[in-house]
């Protein structure tokens, strides 16, 4: 599993920061992110602004290491729009 | 129609796209109007496109994406403060080759989807997209060497006369 995650050309971490990562989860993610650094691309989508990402990882040292690899060579795209699901629901008369 | 030995050899070599293109060409009496290079190019293009489609299908299956959004369908007029220039740049996908990351911040499902899907699928850009066009008759992609809208040898009878 970890090998596959390390190998894929593009990995998507969807809805980042919904819940705080535990120590163990943080370490696992660090391993993945570290393996992929400079070898693959990662998309992170989140409702949280990047400034708050640090708080979403329990161990601050691990958080530093993960964010250092994820954020520094990242393009950023910010969207302000309403939920597309809400718009779709409106169209279908809900 | 009897199967052509060349057709069988193509199949045996795993070149099913070329085999299909050959069959299509054999059904078109007016195909002889095309030069050898053009006919062989059509066969090779068909093979390349079929392979790319197969790879795309495999990748999509592997990615298990729940939405089937594509970047071309993104509504640029929707008011969500999308930086169009940056979006176009990202849509080209070069950043993936450079192993860079992308952070997308926004409300839940605020069209974060389209961009991601395209990034995973990456269409066949390796075969010079500018010269690939879609046949108006059968919607088959083909490489055009001239300003034609319908692929020579298009199997749609209604279009046979337009060539």
Image (cartoon, coloured by chain):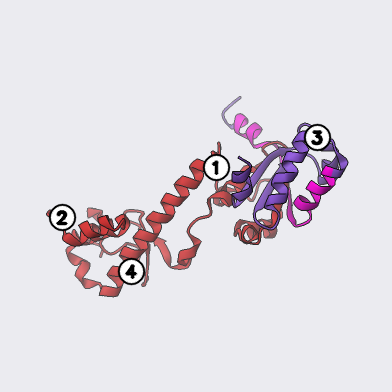
Q: Colour of chain B?
A: red
Q: Colour of chain A?
A: purple
**Residue at image point 59% right, 45% down:** A4
Disc nearest the viewer among 2 and 4: 2
In the image, residue A91 sits, relative to residue A7, either above or below, namely above
Q: Residues within 10 Å of mark 3 (few under 14, many from 20)?
A: some
Circle 2 chain: B
**Residue at image point 79% right, 55% down:** A72
- The residue indicated by pointer 3 is A23
Left or right of B15? Residue A27 is right
Q: Residues within 10 Å of mark 4 (few under 14, many from 20)?
A: some
Q: Could you say which is closer to the camera, residue B60 or residue B29?
A: B60
Q: Is residue A79 visible in this depiction of the protein?
A: no
Disc nearest the viewer among 3 and 2: 3
- The residue indicated by pointer 2 is B3
Residues tagged by mark 3 and mark 4 found on one chain of the structure: no
In the image, residue B73 sits, relative to residue B163, either above or below, namely above
Q: Which mark is residue B63?
A: 1
């Amino acid at each position: 599993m970890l090998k596959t995650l390390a190998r894929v050309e593009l990995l998507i971490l969807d809805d980042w920061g919904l819940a705080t990562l535990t120590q163990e989860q943080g370490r696992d993610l660090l391993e993945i992110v570290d393996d992929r650094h400079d070898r693959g691309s990662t998309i992170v989508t989140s409702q949280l602004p990047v400034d708050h990402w640090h708080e979403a990882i329990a161990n601050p040292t691990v958080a530093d290491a993960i964010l250092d690899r994820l954020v520094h060579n990242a393009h950023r795209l910010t969207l302000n729009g309403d939920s597309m699901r809400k718009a779709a629901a409106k169209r279908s008369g809900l | 129609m009897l199967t052509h030995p060349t057709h069988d050899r193509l199949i045996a070599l795993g070149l099913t796209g070329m085999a299909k293109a050959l069959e299509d060409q054999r059904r078109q009496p007016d195909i002889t109007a095309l030069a050898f290079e053009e006919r062989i190019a059509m066969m090779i293009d068909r093979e390349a496109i079929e392979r790319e489609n197969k790879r795309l299908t495999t990748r999509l299956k592997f990615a298990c994406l729940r939405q089937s959004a594509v970047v071309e369908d993104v509504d640029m007029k929707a008011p969500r403060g999308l930086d169009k220039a940056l979006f176009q740049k990202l849509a080209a996908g070069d950043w993936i080759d450079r192993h860079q990351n992308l952070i997308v911040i926004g409300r839940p499902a605020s069209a974060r989807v389209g961009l991601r899907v395209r990034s995973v699928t990456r269409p066949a850009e390796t075969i010079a997209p500018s010269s690939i066009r879609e046949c108006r008759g059968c919607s088959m992609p083909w490489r055009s060497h001239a300003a034609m809208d319908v692929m020579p040898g298009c199997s749609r009878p209604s279009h046979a006369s337009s060539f």
